[in-house]
């Protein structure tokens, strides 16, 4: 299966692209995109990988589905385009960053600046049908993104995995804690955050402290 993706990731994941489940997934996604509106735009499905090559990854943040509203999803979990209203979960992320590392609230919700510094913004499912949350779950994406996490865990060292909420914790359960820093908390969605499961986790300062200990440049959150 020929997939357009950053060359190092392409080499690392070649075994997945050649598996029957991925061929079936591609056929399904092509049909979905040709028969109705889906997000993100086709050329942005692998944006997380193209902005953050395998050897440049420092931090992994695991999301669930892409946003399913018009113009929101662009291939990076939790991120939206510059002219799109900042979603509630991302507002809470920005508030925690301000409280944790004294960074000012950004003017927009585009997290490309993180991705370009080495933050892999990985959704468990990389596509979604417009206005239908979870519509592309259990079609093969989860197997693919599990393989991504496994490759990072096994072949890299000294990464930070941020696992927010139950699904993300389950997704990252097999990460090797002897080689990487695993940070867990509740999800930044208002439902969890307002119950005290998000604010004060200090994940962003903890990540940077760990990276500095590894002689790796910290992230400018």
Image: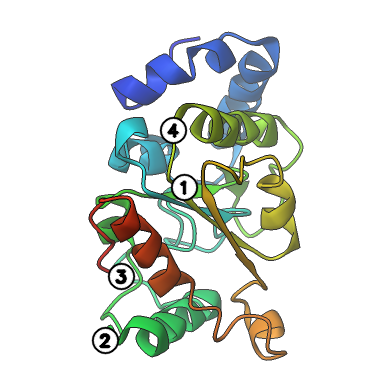
Assess whether mark 3 and mark 4 are in contact (beta carbons under 8 angstroms).
Answer: no
Q: Which of pointers 4 and 2 lies earlier in the amino acid sequence?
A: 2
Q: Which residue is mark 4?
A: 156
Q: Which dot marks residue 40?
A: 1
Q: Which residue is mark 3?
A: 221
| Foreground tag (4 vs 2) | 4
Q: Which residue is mark 2?
A: 104
- For the residues marked 3 and 1, what is the alpha-carbon distance in whole angstroms? 24 Å
- For the residues marked 1 and 2, what is the alpha-carbon distance in whole angstroms? 28 Å
Front residue of 62/45: it is: 62
Q: Which of pointers 3 and 1 lies earlier in the amino acid sequence?
A: 1
Tag 4: Cα neighbours inside 10 Å, few (<14), some, or many (≥20)? some
Circle 3: element type: loop
- For the residues marked 2 and 3, what is the alpha-carbon distance in whole angstroms? 9 Å
Residue 142 in the image: state x and y as whole percent: 68, 37
Tag 1: Cα neighbours inside 10 Å, few (<14), some, or many (≥20)? many
Residue 191 in the image: state x and y as whole percent: 71, 83
Residue at the (55%, 11%) spot, across then down: 15
In the rendered view, tell whether residue 133 sits above or below residue 157: below
| Foreground tag (3 vs 1) | 3
| Foreground tag (1 vs 2) | 2
Q: How many marks?
A: 4
In the rendered view, tell whether residue 148 sits above or below residue 208: above
Residue at the (46%, 47%) spot, across then down: 40
Assess whether mark 2 and mark 1 are in contact (beta carbons under 8 angstroms).
Answer: no
Tag 2: Cα neighbours inside 10 Å, few (<14), some, or many (≥20)? few
- For the residues marked 4 and 2, what is the alpha-carbon distance in whole angstroms? 32 Å
Front residue of 207/108: it is: 207
Residue at the (54%, 15%) spot, across then down: 17
In the rendered view, tell whether residue 171 sits above or below residue 103: above
């Amino acid at each position: 299966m020929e997939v357009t993706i950053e060359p190092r990731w392409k080499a690392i994941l070649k075994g997945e692209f050649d598996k029957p489940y991925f061929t079936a997934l591609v056929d399904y996604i092509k049909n979905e995109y040709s028969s109705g509106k889906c997000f993100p735009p086709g050329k942005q499905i692998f944006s997380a990988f193209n902005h953050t090559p395998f050897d440049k990854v420092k931090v992994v943040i695991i999301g669930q589905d892409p946003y399913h509203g018009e113009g929101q999803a662009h291939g990076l979990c939790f991120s939206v385009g510059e002219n799109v209203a900042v979603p509630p979960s991302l507002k809470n992320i920005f508030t925690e960053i301000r409280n944790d590392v004294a960074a000012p609230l950004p003017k927009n919700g585009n997290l490309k600046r993180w991705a370009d510094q080495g933050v892999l913004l990985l959704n468990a499912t990389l596509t979604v049908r417009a206005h239908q949350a979870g519509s592309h779950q259990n079609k093969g994406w989860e197997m693919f993104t599990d393989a991504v996490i496994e490759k990072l865990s096994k072949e890299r060292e000294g990464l930070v995995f941020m696992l927010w909420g139950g699904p993300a914790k389950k997704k990252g359960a097999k990460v090797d804690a002897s080689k990487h820093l695993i940070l867990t908390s509740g999800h930044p969605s208002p439902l969890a955050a307002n119950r005290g499961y998000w604010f004060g986790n200090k994940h962003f300062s903890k990540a940077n402290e760990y990276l500095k200990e590894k002689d790796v440049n910290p992230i400018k959150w």
